[in-house]
Amino acid sequence: MLCPDCKKEVELSKGDPQVSRVRLNGTVVHATIEIGDLCGECGRLVQGSKTDIERDLKDVPSLKSHLQHKRKVELLKAERIYEPAEYASVKITYGLTCDCDRLPMYEGTLLGSAKMVVQP
């Protein structure tokens, strides 16, 4: 791919996903992610994508009795997973805790994929 800064064809390196926030709204876990491919020579963002992913927890059996309690969600890990060249995919692992102290931390995952867009 052509790097606008280097002005030549370069190999791209896959950047780590950036998770700007993981939040809980009712029974839905939301995450906003940014994914980018960087110039292998200068490190400039050459193509990238930003997307929101979500999962509704209302049907998770171990959480059903805790959905009315106050809960907290936190990011545990974000990793890029294999994808075709024009797409980027991310797997986010999050932890959910409940104020009742009867629920051990629930670990869940969000999967997201987005088409990469060349950056100006």
Image (cartoon, grey):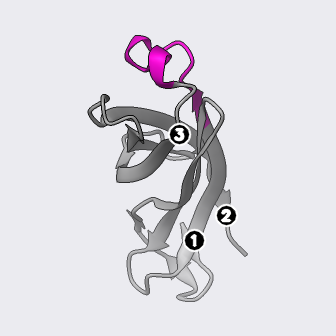
Say above or below: 67 vs 59: below
Percent coordinates x, y for residue 9 in the rendering: 50, 74
First reached walking from the N terminus: tag 1 or tag 2: 1
Amino acid type of the residue that numbered disc 1 sits on in the rendered structure: Val
Alpha carbon distance from label 3 to label 1: 42 Å
Say above or below: 104 vs 20: above
Comparing labels 3 and 2, the label whose residue is closer to the camera: 3
| Label 2, residues with CA under 10 Å away: few <14, some 14-19, many ≥20 | some
Please name the residue that numbered disc 3 is placed on.
70
* Rendered residue at 52%/81% (across/down): 44
| Label 3, residues with CA under 10 Å away: few <14, some 14-19, many ≥20 | few
On whether residue 55 falls in the magenta region, the answer is: yes
Task: Please give the range of residues in magenta.
Answer: 54-66
SS at mark 2 in the image: strand
Percent coordinates x, y for residue 66 in the rendering: 47, 24
Amino acid type of the residue that numbered disc 3 sits on in the rendered structure: Lys
Percent coordinates x, y for residue 59 in the rendering: 53, 12
Comparing labels 3 and 1, the label whose residue is closer to the camera: 3
Please name the residue that numbered disc 2 is placed on.
118
In the displayed structure, does residue 52 sit left or right of residue 103? right
| Label 1, residues with CA under 10 Å away: few <14, some 14-19, many ≥20 | many
Please name the residue that numbered disc 1 is placed on.
46
Amino acid type of the residue that numbered disc 2 sits on in the rendered structure: Val
